[in-house]
Amino acid sequence: MGKNHYLVFVLFLVILYIFRLISLLECQLLPKTELKTKESTTKLNDMQHVTMRKSQQYNNYKPIHGNGLISLTISNHQCVLTTSLNHINSLENKENKQIGIQHEITAFSSLVMGLKMAIETTVQGIRNQLLAQLKTLFPHQSAALLAGIILGEQGLFSKDLLEMFRTSGLIHIVVASGGNIALLTSVVFATAQSYLSRRKTMLITFGCVLCYVLLAGLEPPLIRASIMVCLTMSALLFGRKTFSLYTLIITALVMIIVDPLLLFSLSFQLSFAATAGIVLFGGMLRQYLTVKLAHYSWAHFLVADISQTIAAQLCVTPLLLHTFGQTNIFSLIANSLVVPLVAPVMIGGVVVLGLSYLLFPLAVFFSWLLTILTEYIIWISFFFSHVISYAINLSLNWLIVFIIWVVSIWWWHRNYGASAA
C-alpha cells in the first residue's frame, strides 16, 4: 500500500477526531441555560427586526383612494384598514393552494408510512419463521448461535451464554456484520456469473444483499458493508479500479452525512475500526505469516483468516479498552480457533434452513452434522471465558486511542509498507 494511502487515512482520522471533539464540546460544555438564553435572544432580535420592518412599511405608506381602500389618521398615527376584494381573493387562493399542497404531502407521507409498516411486518414475519425453524432443527444453544451468526438475532441467547461469548472475546461472531455481507456477495457472485452476464450477476447480487440487510436489520455494520459492495461492484461494472481504503472513507462519510450521530455509535465505530485494520494491515500480516509458516503446509489455509483476525484486533482492541475498560488477553487465540469456522457454519445454516422447507428429513440429518461445529464454537467460548481467562483492566481516553491508531499505521508502514506496496 502506497504512502499516499496512509496519509489520506491519517488525515481522515484527524478530521473525524476533530469533529467528534467539537460535537462533545457542544453537547457537554455548553449549559442548557445558555442555549435557552441564546435561543431567546435570537427570537427577540428577529421579532425586533420584523417590527422595525413593519414600522418602516407603515411610515412609507401613501394613501390611495379607490378599490375600497380606507385610510384613517388618528393622533398622527396612521391606521390602515385594507378591504380590497382583490387582495382578499388573492389571499384565499394562496391559502387554498397551501392547503392542497399540505393534503398532498400528508397523503404521500401516509403512503410511505404504510409501505414502511407493510415491509417491516413482512420482514419480521419471515424472520420469526426462520427463528422457529432453527429452534425446531437444533438444540437451544446451537439454535441461538446460528440465529446470531445468520440473522444477528440475540433474543435466543440466555444471559449466561451471551456473557460467555462477551468474556471470551467472541461476541462479534453472533452479531450481523460486514463479514456476512462479504460472504453472501462472494457466494452469490461466484454462482451467478457462471450462468449470467456480468450486469445481471451484479443486479442479482445487489438484490440479495438488499434482502439480507432488511432481514438481518438495518445495523450500521451491514449498511457500511452494503455501501462498500455497491461502490466496488459499480466501479467494476464501469471498468474502474477501486481502492478499499478510499471506498471505506467514502462509505463512512456518506453514513455520517446522512446520520451524524453514527459517529457516537459503538457498532459503527467497531465496524469501521475492524474494516480499517483489515484493509491497512491484512495484506502485510498475510505476507508475513505466509513466510513464517512456509514449512507448515497444514497452516496455509488458515493464514487468511488468522491475518484478518489479528489485523482487525489491532484497531478494535484500543476502542474496546476505551468503551469497556477491559479485554481478554486470550481473545486473539480464541478468535483464531473460531473465526475460520464462521463462514462454513453460516453457509451450512442457510442450506439447512432451505432444505427444511423442501426435504425436512434431509435437513434434520445435516443439522446433526452442523451441530458438531456449533457445539465446538460454544465449547471454545466456554473454555476461554471460564478455564483460561485473564482480563486486561485499562481505560483509555479517546485521544490515546487516536494516537495508538496513528502510531500503528506509521510503524507498520515504516517496517512493512515497502514490501507490501
Image (cartoon, rainbow, N blue to C red):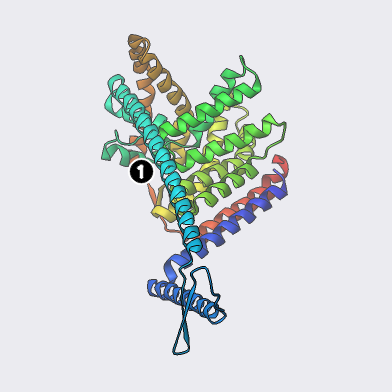
Q: Position of residue 238 (x, y in %)?
A: 70, 31
Position of 399 with respect to 119 (left or right) is right
Please state which of residues 104 and 112 is positioned toward the viewer in this rendering: 104
Image quadrant occupied by the N terminus: top right
Q: Residue at x 49, y 56 (%)?
A: 94
Residue 48, compared with residue 269, is above or below; it is: below
Q: Can you see residue 65?
A: yes
Q: Residue at x 63, y 40 (%)?
A: 244
Q: Secondary structure at mark 1?
A: helix
Residue 366: name its quadrant.
top left
Residue 45, compared with residue 129, is above or below; it is: below
| Label 1, residues with CA under 10 Å away: few <14, some 14-19, many ≥20 | many
Disc 1 residue type (three-letter): Thr
Please state which of residues 78 and 247 is positioned toward the viewer in this rendering: 78
Q: How many marks?
A: 1
Position of 137 with respect to 252 (left or right) is left
Q: Position of residue 88 (x, y in %)?
A: 46, 62
Q: Residue at x 42, y 54 (%)?
A: 323
Residue 243: name its quadrant.
top right
For label 1, the residue is 167
Q: Can you see residue 337?
A: no
